[in-house]
Amino acid sequence: MDQVVIFKQIFDKVRNDLNYQWFYSELKRHNVSHYIYYLATENVHIVLKNDNTVLLKGLKNIVSVKFSKDRHLIETTSNKLKSREITFQEYRRNLAKAGVFSVGYKYPRTKKILLYL
């Protein structure tokens, strides 16, 4: 199966199920070094451990991103997603309102790093 199709399935499943342990194990299994998720367009730029890249094009409507950051809204929104109080689409819209353009994830061997850009 094509890598784009595989990664689209992985990202679609985690958006619906919010099962991050499964998501993390799938990314490791497919040798993902890190990825950047562009909230405005839902494009995902994936970098593999061999430095190859995969670009997933988003199919959703573009979300307008504010220019000023609201750190309180970022933290509140992240906590609500973790506790499953909101859907991934609500998370995406709230982060855009909070001035976040993209979310980057890096997977070193010891821990996950989350960056709001």
Image (cartoon, grey):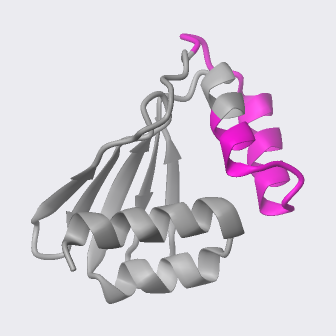
Q: Position of residue 45 (x, y in %)?
A: 28, 50
Q: Position of residue 48 (x, y in %)?
A: 20, 70
Q: Position of residue 20 (x, y in %)?
A: 62, 74
| Count of numbered tags | 0
Q: Is residue 38 above or below residue 25?
A: above
Q: Is residue 31 visible?
A: yes
Main secondary structure found in the magenta portion:
helix
Magenta span contains residue 88: yes
Quarter occupied by the N terminus? bottom left
Q: Is residue 43 above or below residue 95?
A: below
Magenta span contains residue 41: no
User: Residue at left 59%, top 67%?
Assistant: 14
User: Residue at left 42%, top 31%?
Assistant: 41
In front: 11, or 60? Answer: 60
Q: Is residue 83 above or below residue 91?
A: below
Q: Which residues lie in the magenta part?
A: 66-92
